[in-house]
Amino acid sequence: MSLPKSKKKSIYTARAEYADRTKKENESFKEVVVPIQEIQTALLLLNSQEDAVLLTVFKNITEYARKQEENIEELKKLNLLDTLLKKKLFIDSEVVMIRRFAMYLACALIESINVLQDMEPEKTKQILQTCTDAFLKEVDDFGLEYLTVVINKCLDDPQVALEMLNESELLEKFFLITAKTENPDILWQSFEAIHKMLLLLDGPSMQAFSTLPSFPIDRVLCDITNEFKDIRSAALKVIKDLVVDTSEETIFADVSRCVYTLQQLTKLFCDHATTEHGVEAIEALATAMRTEKMTNLFFEHNLFDRIIQNVNENMLEYMPSVTCKVIWIFAENAKYEQYLTRIFEANVTDLLLDCLLKPDPLGPAYYVIAGLNRMMKCSDAANRMLQLYEAGVVERLTYLISQPAIDIRTREQAADLINNLLRFAFHPTAQQLLGAEITQVLGKIFGQQQTDLSVDFQLSLLNIVEQLAQNDEYRAALAQTDLLATNIALMLKNSFATAILVNNIFRCLCTLVEEEPVRAALLTHYIAASMKRGLKSLSNLVKTSVTNFIMQTTRFPEMVHEYIEMGVLEVLILNQKLAHCVSTWGPAIEAILSKCPSLKFCIRNHLGFTDSTAGNDFLVSKKKFDDFRVFQNILKEEVSPLHPILVVNFERFVNPPELVIEVPIECFPIEERQGISTEIWCYCRKPGDKELPRILDHLNNELDRYGILENPAKMSRCIDFDNLAKRAKVIADVVEAALGNNLKRLDLNTSEEWAQHTVQCHLNDIAKMLHCNFIPMGMIRSGCQFERAILFKVLADQIGLPCTLQRAVDGRLLFNEVPLPVEIEQDIHCDNRTMKFMPWRMLRPTHIVDLMFNVGELYPIQSRQALQYLRLY
């Protein structure tokens, strides 16, 4: 039977061509096996295209590198790293082992290099870029491990770390690998790298970085309690970096995450309290406690109680150093007053005090005393501190602030605690401080170098002085030695760079200046120079503090004399425009001038009701000076001025011997020497005056004769408006009697030029007799409006009659004003029964006193008679 044609199959087909096996064998390259003994030769083979060759070479190079560290150095010299970078770490190779070997060797080489010292930033950036490209492509776990190590090493350079922060694609994969890896080395190196990046970020940048969706915060939190020490440490670093941010938009905004964080840190502390990680957990917890939300969760979930229990059971007896460290957490908790009672009941106050009193020459950590400062808001805790005064709490604090070697933060907190104790229990604390010789301690501290003292520390010490000086007894104790005041004055000279410090120094001095030794020390150390510098400062706060100090110290004559003689008043007067921005500028000027009526009248050409000449030398020049410094120089120079200066003093009857200046007769013209050739002439610029008290006695007798010597109300502060005109009339008559010699009483409408000439001749005769133009008021027998106005003012001041002294615009005429308010019906403000108690500074002049024509008459201001008297009509 034959098959169909379609089903027929050829059993054999003859070939027309056959392969030439001889030719194939001739073209093939046989395997080469060559022994290599030089590393340089092996490195050349890294250019091979054969995977088997690369594997063999890499295997041998790796074994060579692992033998000893010197081999790594040799590979560095042979530029193996550059070769690997040029080949881009063989990341394109399909053989996993080739990539592993390349990345391992790169890792070994870079780990042995100090990135900051031995490598240029550009080179490091090249390495990071190559590793970035490799990291994005690599999927092998070992390869990722080696790349992570290299990346972490490169991040030692801050510039390179900033570059990586801009690689968003790399960061996303980097965070993803970190969150999912089971490789402990990758985890450790990743946490370290994240920590280095966080260190470069400010608050907002850190917040944006840590809140990225892929940021592995949960993995970090989980591994806080990892079994591997290095991973725990790295995770803690990241957490400590992140909990610094106390804003509401941080990665810890989620409450559950906050609770988990606190639980993990608490567990870590309780499990590893005696190790370094326990200390790191304390630091992280203390940092977290700076936010109220974290603190609330810490107490709500009983984590505070858990730590307290651990401390009480395991640490009080066996680990006191850890106890003093864990107190940092409680010190941060104490910032929130709602938990102070709970903290006190847990005996934290005693723990803090125990750490404070430990005899460590370097002192306790600053947070120990900071915790005590915060606990002062709890009265029970404050009383507990008082109970331990006998144990030496105050002495310990005094020691801490006095030692330059102790951390400045500790010294600051110690000074603050002393201030808090003074406010809580002033007298017991002050007595303890004085027993600890606080005056000497503070004096020595203020004498230390400014660079060793912080501004906050100096402010706290000044506050201690200020509080103690509020008590008269303690202030006197502070002033027993001039060391304190001297060093404060010296410190002031170097403190003008800090306005608030200068302000507090002057405020402190205001309390101390009550004591005479303090004033003497300040004057000795040129306090006026510092005050002038402060008045010229650009800071309004400094200028205000100086002017306040001036107003506080013008009670003391020596201080007023210093301000006048050393130019403080001059600076104030020449810069009166600053009164627009310093409200106390004008009052400071008035405070000085009120104690020196002579200068005030020279500058203001006016003395008001409150400007009394009693108890002072009152000198008035016949010449009006546009610049008060000219008059001031005249008072300083030991010569006679060209123009007469009238001197008023009721207490100096004779010339003081120490002020009498002897002038050899040779100094005078020949015509004045005849008949007295052997006599030595004398003059005195502050002459005695025995006649002026007699005039005052005569005035008192006249007032007594009329029954108006004493105020009817028998009160020195009240004003006898009923008899004011009568008393003014009596004074005017006494003045006219004293100064009316050789002068006729004229009519208000007539000229008095001849009288002025008579007075001038009279003054010249007196000056010639005294050899000086400083003329005592009592020696003048002839006087016109100028002399009479002065005498009227000084007599009125002696008997308590409100009166002004005013110089006319042309400077040649003086006149007096008195207040005679007119009572208006049904106006309680003008009732004499109330107005007689009105402060003198509130009085307003209403009438001018006529001392020349109708003697004793009072002319209303702006009346025709007043204008005629002033020669204005």
Image (cartoon, rainbow, N blue to C red):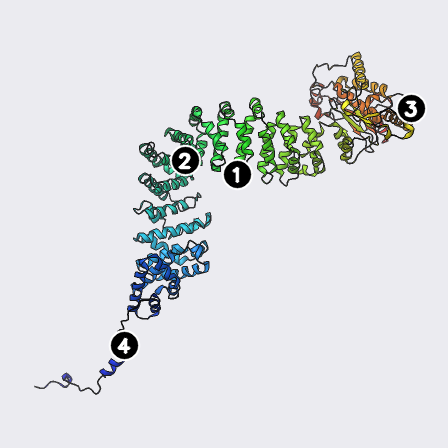
The picture places residue 348, in percent across and down from the top left corner, at 38, 31
Q: Which residue is mark 2?
A: 333
Mark toward the start of the polypeptide (4 vs 1): 4
Element type at marker 2?
Answer: helix
Q: Tell me which residue sits at (27%, 80%) in the image.
A: 27
Q: Which residue is mark 1?
A: 452
Q: Marks 2 and 1, Cα distance to the nearest angstrom?
A: 30 Å
Q: Marks 3 and 2, Cα distance to the nearest angstrom?
A: 97 Å
User: How crowded is the residue under tag 2: few (<14 C-alpha within 10 Å), some, or many (20+)?
Assistant: many
Q: Which mark is residue 675?
A: 3
Figure disc tally: 4
Q: Nearer the viewer, mark 2 or mark 1?
A: 1
Viewer-side residue, 158 vs 613 = 158
Asked if the residue under mark 1 is in contact with the one under mark 4, i.e. CB atoms within 8 Å, the reply is no
Viewer-side residue, 195 vs 366 = 366
Q: Tell me which residue sits at (58%, 32%) in the image.
A: 487
Mark toward the start of the polypeptide (4 vs 3): 4
Viewer-side residue, 713 vs 754 = 754
Q: Quadrant of residue 872?
A: top right
Given the image, on which type of amino acid does mark 3 rest?
Gly
The picture places residue 467, in percent across and down from the top left corner, at 54, 27
Mark toward the start of the polypeptide (4 vs 2): 4
The quarter in which the C terminus is drawn is top right
Q: Marks 4 and 3, Cα distance to the nearest angstrom?
A: 147 Å
Vertical arrangement, residue 343 with respect to residue 145, above or below: above
User: How crowded is the residue under tag 1: few (<14 C-alpha within 10 Å), some, or many (20+)?
Assistant: few
